[in-house]
Image: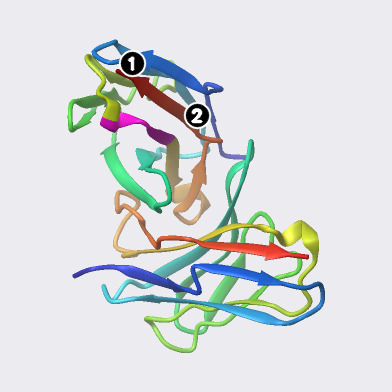
Amino acid sequence: GDSVTQMEGPVTLSEEAFLTINCTYTATGYPSLFWYVQYPGEGLQLLLKATKADDKGSNKGFEATYRKETTSFHLEKGSVQVSDSAVYFCALSDPYTGNQFYFGTGTSLTVIP
Amino acid sequence: EAQVTQNPRYLITVTGKKLTVTCSQNMNHEYMSWYRQDPGLGLRQIYYSMNVEVTDKGDVPEGYKVSRKEKRNFPLILESPSPNQTSLYFCASRSSGGVTNEQFFGPGTRLTVL
């Protein structure tokens, strides 16, 4: 079945460091891929998405490229800020499974000044 | 403002006492869903609904019920809560227009069952 695997956390970085959070997926069809972010005490909100192979999603300095050949959608940011501290979830939506959403386990990021 | 609302935000109850967590969206979305979030397990889907009067089980439906009598509301019912249902619950909705549509999440309900 469909699934999403993302790197274990927690991740702690200094401000202005480079961030990579790995995400790989397994899907029956041709899914859309998403990164959601959860700030402390809040619900999840969409950070970025990509709907087909080689698409790059970007928002707030974060980027992720849909790589079909490696079934990956790694999240990157060139220079993190303290305000980026949150939990990040990789997710997919697969039309072959009725557009069900599948989430990874989440990666907690803490950015220290 | 487009939003998904949940009530209550926090709830402490005892084993066996029936409870309902309400969820409402104002975006005219067809698709609604309930998730629970547990440490190390991420989000797991409990139930979802493709439209009014259409509901289906997700990955962890045991011990839960839902109903979808109106498009905007999708309550989660725990008929006889148990301690293993202590968790953070999220309701979400999206348009069913396509696989690319994002889900919008409510703020969460933290449930503790003693």
Q: Quadrant of residue B83?
A: bottom right
Give the image location of residue A22, x and y in percent.
44, 19
Q: Nearer the viewer, mark 1 or mark 2?
A: 1
Q: Earlier in the sequence, mark 1 or mark 2?
A: 1
Q: Please say whether residue B102 is one of the residues in the magenta stretch.
A: no
Q: Which mark is residue A4?
A: none
Whole-percent x and y of residue A7? 52, 21
Callout 2, which amino acid? Tyr
Image quarter where the C terminus of chain A lies is top left
Q: Which mark is residue A19?
A: 1
Q: Classify mark 1: helix, strand or loop.
A: strand
Q: Between residues A103 and B18, which one lies in front from this camera angle?
A: B18
Verify CB contact (< 8 Å) between mark 1 and mark 2.
Answer: no
- The residue singled out by tag 2 in the image is A25
Q: Which residue occupies 26% across, 73% down?
A: B27
Q: Quadrant of the N terminus of chain A?
A: top right
Instruction: Give percent across and percent down for residue B105.
Output: 38, 59
Label 1 CA crowd tier, 10 Å (few <14, some 14–19, many 20+): some
For this rendering, which residue is in front, A56 or A83? A83
Compared to residue B32, the image places residue B22 above or below, namely below
Q: Residue furthest bottom?
A: B69
Give the residue at x 52% y 36%. A104
Q: Secondary structure at mark 2?
A: strand
Please rate how many residues cluster around mark 2, counting C-alpha atoms within 10 Å: few if below 14, some from 14 to 19, many from 20: many
The verdict on residue A87 being magenta is: yes
Residue numbers of the magenta segment:
A83-88
Q: Residue at x 52, y 23 (%)?
A: A10
> What chain is tagged by disc 2?
A
Chain that bears disc 1: A
A17 or B67: nearer the viewer: A17
Give the amino acid type for the residue marked by disc 1 in the picture: Leu
Residue at 43% in and 41% down: A92
